[in-house]
Amino acid sequence: MPRDTVPLDLRATPFDHPDAQRLIAAVQQVYVERYGGTDATHTDPAEFAAPHGLFLVGYAAGTPVAAGGWRVRDAEPADPVVRDGDAEIKRMYVVPEARGRSHARAVLAAIERSAAAPGRRRMILETGTRQPEALALYRSSGYVPIPGFGVYRDEPGSRCLAKIIA
């Protein structure tokens, strides 16, 4: 089967699994290159375990090439943008050699379905202006701008987006 037609096999994978960690390290390196440092947002592997979240690794021909996950976010006084029923997307990434094959769309769709299944109503995320490909993916998938939340809420290059999923 030609490389361009290798299907993506999405697997629920622990956030701290070696394949997940390799892809997370790769996306963190992208942040270093584009923003000058890694993402300072606190993440705990337990947040990405059912029923509080999910982390997916996508494999093409047995090789990990894509990742992304969600974690429960509910209303909290420190972050009034976040609502009860929210799920936050974290660590979406596709390795450069596997881009252009709709893998990111497949991961995103699976994340949305898996968050809606236990009753999450809205997906939220934070990305930045130095990731135009991410902004294009999310906007073309129905995400709309919302006020800033999280660690980067006051950063001028931060963009926060949301989509109703239920």
Image (spheres, grey):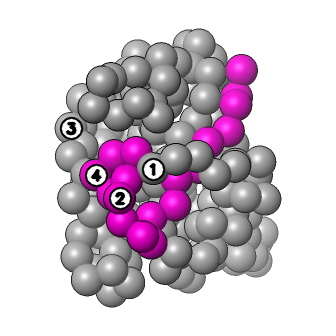
**Whole-percent x and y of residue 113?**
66, 30
Residue name at image x 40 percent, y 45 percent: 149
Q: Amino acid at mark 2?
A: Asp
Query: Helix, strand, or loop for circle 2?
Result: loop
Q: Circle 4 — which element?
A: loop
- Viewer-nearest residue: 118 or 141: 141
Q: Are marks 2 and 1 in contact (CB under 8 Å)?
A: yes
Residue type indicated by callout 3: Asp
Q: Which residue is mark 4?
A: 151
Task: Indicate which disc residue 148 carries.
Answer: 1
Mark sitting earlier along the chain (3/4) = 3
Q: Which residue carries the number 2 mark?
A: 154
Q: Which residue is at the far bottom? A: 33
How far separated are the C-alphas under marks 3 and 1? 21 Å
User: Which residue is denoted by mark 3 in the rendering?
Assistant: 44
Question: Relative to residue 63, is residue 2 depicted above or below?
Answer: below
